[in-house]
């Protein structure tokens, strides 16, 4: 059998290790384990083995590329594929090249493009293996028919998959070309079924119907191949083969239909059918340019001699016009076989431990919802405690009721607070933390500045070449591709600007309370000498006893709140099983169900917070009432000693607040550094991919310029050369309704492509100056896990996950921590 096979698309070798490692580490919920690099390396080898082994055109090669395609399918649901910036390049399967340049090709930084090209080569390889089968055996016929039907199914699938890439494809991936290949493979599958029916000795009527259908299928193929959009693609041999098959199989239809006429004693129709069949066999041979269907032609000639002899001696029937013969009818046995998953018979997912992206998003949304509730409740507790401390400081409690001997003795509570301030480093500890803020801020600003510089440099280069080559510069403009990146950069910039304002508030609060904190830092004897002596002993009156009891209630309430805050921080909401069930049943996860479940899980703790705050109102009222009675007994309490004790108590509260906030702020800046490095990596990956695409297009344009300069006629530059995929559409932003809270207790996300963003709220003037930073404002990426700590793969190489070495001074974060540089203790 003379069967056509589809040529393969020639790929380029790529390195998947570094970009995939970076993407998995930055986006997957589950951190990479020690064997992850081995799996990534195996995947890289699998890819380069599979896409080149197909040229061996055997069943082992088919199994290898099946397994690779299965792995692509398994991987794409576990990583954000729009961020997998690897420039894949494939040449046009039907382009023969010319003296003017290489084969037409397309380079796209898209995993979807890789899948399309791999599928094309699978279908092409299936056609080659099908055509190489032994058609004398039943097994060979079955295998060939199955492979041709599978190939037809793949080409049919690609008709919708290829245009979805968003770029004009190479000619082999155009819808018209894929349609031709699909119906051609199906026609050849029907031909194999026809041959099997003949070999199996099936009834003549069935064989005639199969052949009639096959004749029509080849006629459709021939008609479609001659369309203007595809005519130039096909070799002369392809057209000859299809033309010959159409005529030859029409002849086979008439040959077997003549047997049906003979069985019905319709000798005239039999002779007419055989005469027409013999003419068509000659036509088939003429069209094909070589002998075809000779066996059937000889059989038709022998039958015609016998039929004429029988008619001359017995029937003397009239020979009708062949066009008036009764049709045999049609029967299509070959059908397109849809793509099934997995294709490989023994597929094993290398990344089975990674969590699917949909589940990652749901888990991160769940964590974000939990974090918002936790941060809001912690904010309520701390705000309430601050209010309570303010009331106590204004009333000089508990110091006013602790002094029970005359002289210079200090209240035990004040001594305890002073000891705690000294133990925690006093003024110097706060000053050190404040001094670290500019360095942390500068580090983050430099990373963001470098990231924006890369985007601007890429855009300027693209615009310059677009102005130079005009309409010949066919790839998508940079501004369209970087919309989401620039939106993310803008959000990060807004966060940094708010942090600058927050830092100023911290310094102002520290400076305004510096004297009180310094006083608490002094040794006990100096502290005691600096405070006026008490005017007298405090009696054990009923008001004093009541105030002491109320102070014990205050301490109990604070301990309870510490426990509640700890429980809030450690609260877990595990919905993984529910999410997996939802994905299995509905293919999606209902966000409303997530909100309801998280709210239900945290409801008991929220009730404890509400109860604690509610009890505080009555507690403050009782304290104020008892203090009024106490004041009536001992005086107004407005003496200088009471004022100083009250100021020192307030200074202690400010010290505790500042130290707590600054530690959270330092962690925030550190986390922001990691997030910005990840963001920079993604932008760098994008710029690297765009650079590769630019170089590919430049090669084509340079070759064209050389040819034009030599006097050759200028052809149109194909618009399918090197272009990047369209930008992902970001989710519509929604206004956050979560109240502002301190530096994130439960870290969420930061902006990243295709994730939704909330707007930044205005910074309140109360409680925590960092309330506008991530929590309650901009959520961290919904598919994010922190990268490795400083000093790992992000240092010493360009942060684009491709490992290009950076010239000294170009990138401020290229050095590991440097303990020998006191001005840059962290090496930045």
Image (cartoon, helix red, strand yellow):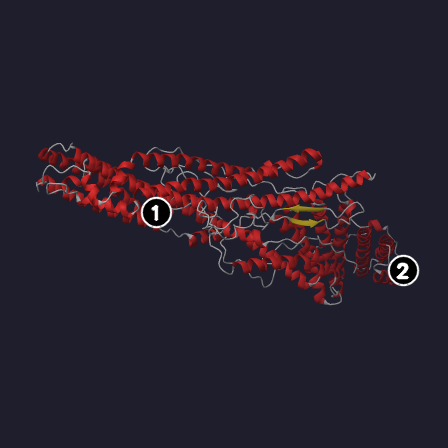
Between the C-alphas of marks 1 and 2, the distance is: 92 Å
Residue 139 position within the rendered picture, expressed as x and y whole percent measured from the top left: 70, 66
* Residue 308 circle label: 2
Vertical arrangement, residue 132 with respect to residue 404, above or below: below
> Can residue 722 be seen in this snapshot?
no
Vertical arrangement, residue 239 with respect to residue 763, above or below: below
The quarter in which the N terminus is drawn is bottom right
- Give the side of residue 192 with respect to residue 423, left or right: right
- Give the side of residue 59 with respect to residue 481, left or right: right
Residue 507 position within the rendered picture, expressed as x and y whole percent measured from the top left: 35, 36
Observer-side mark, 1 or 2, equals: 1
Residue 695 position within the rendered picture, expressed as x and y whole percent measured from the top left: 68, 44
Total number of numbered discs in the rendering: 2
Disc on the earlier residue, 1 or 2: 2
> Can residue 52 be seen in this snapshot?
yes
Residue at 38% in and 51% down:
573
* Residue 600 circle label: 1
How many C-alpha atoms fall within 10 Å of the one at disc 2: few (<14), some, or many (≥20)? some
Helix, strand or loop at label 2? It is: helix
Query: Front-most of 676 and 316?
Result: 676
Helix, strand or loop at label 1? It is: helix
How many C-alpha atoms fall within 10 Å of the one at disc 1: few (<14), some, or many (≥20)? few
Residue at 54% in and 46% down:
681
Query: Front-most of 432 and 79?
Result: 432
- Give the side of residue 218 with respect to residue 363, left or right: right
Residue 204 position within the rendered picture, expressed as x and y whole percent measured from the top left: 77, 61
Query: Front-most of 110 and 130?
Result: 110
């Amino acid at each position: 059998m003379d069967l056509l096979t589809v040529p393969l698309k020639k790929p380029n070798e790529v390195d998947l290790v570094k970009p995939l490692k970076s993407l998995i580490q930055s986006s997957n919920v589950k951190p990479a384990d020690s064997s992850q690099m081995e799996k990534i390396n195996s995947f890289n080898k699998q890819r380069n083995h599979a896409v080149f082994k197909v040229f061996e055109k055997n069943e082992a090669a088919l199994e290898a590329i099946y397994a690779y395609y299965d792995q692509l399918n398994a991987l794409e649901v576990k990583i954000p594929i729009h961020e997998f910036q690897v420039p894949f390049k494939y040449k046009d399967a039907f382009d023969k090249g010319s003296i003017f340049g290489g084969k037409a090709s397309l380079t796209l930084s898209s995993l979807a493009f890789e899948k399309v090209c791999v599928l094309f080569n699978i279908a092409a390889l299936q056609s080659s293996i099908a055509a190489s089968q032994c058609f004398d055996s039943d097994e060979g016929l079955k295998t060939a028919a199955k492979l041709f039907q599978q190939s037809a199914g793949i080409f049919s699938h690609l008709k919708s998959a290829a245009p979805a890439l968003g770029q004009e494809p190479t000619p082999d991936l155009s819808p018209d070309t894929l349609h031709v290949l699909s119906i051609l493979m199906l026609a050849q599958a029907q031909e194999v079924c026809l041959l099997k029916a003949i070999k199996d000795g099936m009834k003549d009527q069935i064989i005639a119907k199969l052949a009639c259908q096959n004749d029509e299928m080849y006629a459709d193929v021939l008609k479609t191949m001659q369309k203007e959009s595809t005519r130039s693609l096909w070799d002369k041999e392809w057209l000859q083969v299809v033309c010959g098959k159409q005529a030859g199989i029409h002849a086979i239809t008439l040959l077997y239909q003549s047997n049906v006429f003979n069985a019905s004693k319709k000798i005239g129709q039999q002779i007419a059918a055989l005469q027409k069949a013999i003419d068509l066999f000659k036509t088939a041979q003429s069209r094909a340019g070589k002998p075809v269907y000779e066996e059937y032609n000889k059989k038709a000639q022998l039958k015609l001699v016998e039929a004429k002899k029988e008619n001359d001696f017995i029937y003397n029937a009239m020979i009708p016009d062949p066009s008036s013969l009764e049709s045999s009818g049609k029967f299509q046995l070959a059908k397109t076989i849809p793509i099934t998953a997995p294709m490989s018979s023994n597929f094993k997912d290398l990344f089975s431990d990674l969590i699917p992206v949909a589940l990652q998003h749901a888990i991160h949304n769940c964590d974000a919802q939990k974090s918002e509730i936790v941060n809001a409740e912690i904010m309520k507790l701390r705000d309430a405690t601050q209010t309570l401390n303010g009331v106590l400081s204004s009333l000089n409690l508990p110091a006013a009721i602790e002094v029970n001997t005359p002289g210079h003795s200090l209240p035990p509570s004040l001594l305890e607070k002073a000891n705690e301030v000294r133990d925690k480093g006093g003024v110097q500890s706060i000053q050190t933390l404040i001094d670290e803020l500019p360095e942390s801020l500068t580090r983050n600003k430099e990373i963001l500045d470098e990231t924006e510089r890369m985007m601007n440099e890429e855009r300027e280069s693209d615009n310059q070449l677009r102005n130079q080559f005009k309409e010949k510069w066919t790839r998508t403009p940079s501004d369209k591709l970087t919309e989401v990146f620039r939106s993310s950069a803008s959000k990060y910039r807004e966060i940094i600007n708010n942090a600058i304002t927050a830092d100023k508030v911290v310094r102002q609060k520290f400076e305004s309370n510096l004297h009180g904190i310094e006083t608490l830092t002094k040794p006990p004897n100096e502290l005691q000498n600096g405070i006026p002596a008490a005017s007298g002993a405090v009696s054990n009156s009923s008001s004093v006893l009541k105030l002491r009891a109320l102070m014990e209630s205050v301490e109990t309430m604070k301990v309870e709140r510490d426990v509640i805050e700890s429980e809030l921080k450690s609260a877990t909401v595990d919905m993984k099983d529910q999410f997996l069930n939802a994905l299995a049943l509905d293919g999606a996860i209902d966000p409303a169900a997530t909100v309801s479940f998280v709210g239900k899980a945290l409801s008991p703790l929220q009730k404890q917070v509400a109860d604690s705050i509610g009890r505080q109102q009555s507690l403050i009222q009782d304290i104020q009432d008892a203090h009024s009675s106490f004041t009536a007994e001992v005086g107004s309490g407005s003496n200088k000693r009471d004022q100083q004790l009250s100021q020192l108590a307030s200074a202690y509260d400010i010290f505790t607040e500042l130290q707590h906030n600054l530690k959270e702020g330092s962690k925030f800046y550190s986390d922001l550094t990691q997030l910005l490095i990840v963001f920079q990596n993604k932008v760098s990956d994008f710029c690297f991919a765009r650079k590769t695409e630019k170089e590919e297009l430049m090669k084509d344009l340079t070759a064209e310029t050389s040819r034009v300069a030599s006097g050759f006629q200028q052809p149109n530059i194909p618009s399918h050369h090197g272009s990047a995929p369209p930008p992902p559409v970001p989710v519509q932003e929604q206004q956050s309704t979560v109240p502002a809270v301190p530096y994130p207790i439960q870290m969420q996300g930061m902006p990243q492509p295709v994730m939704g963003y909330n707007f930044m709220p205005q910074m309140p003037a109360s409680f925590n100056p960092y309330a506008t930073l991530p929590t309650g404002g901009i959520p961290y990426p919904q598919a994010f896990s922190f990268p490795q700590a400083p000093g790992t793969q992000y240092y010493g190489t360009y942060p684009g996950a491709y490992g290009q070495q950076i010239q000294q001074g170009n990138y401020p974060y290229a050095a590991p921590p440097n303990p020998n540089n006191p001005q840059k203790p962290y090496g930045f």
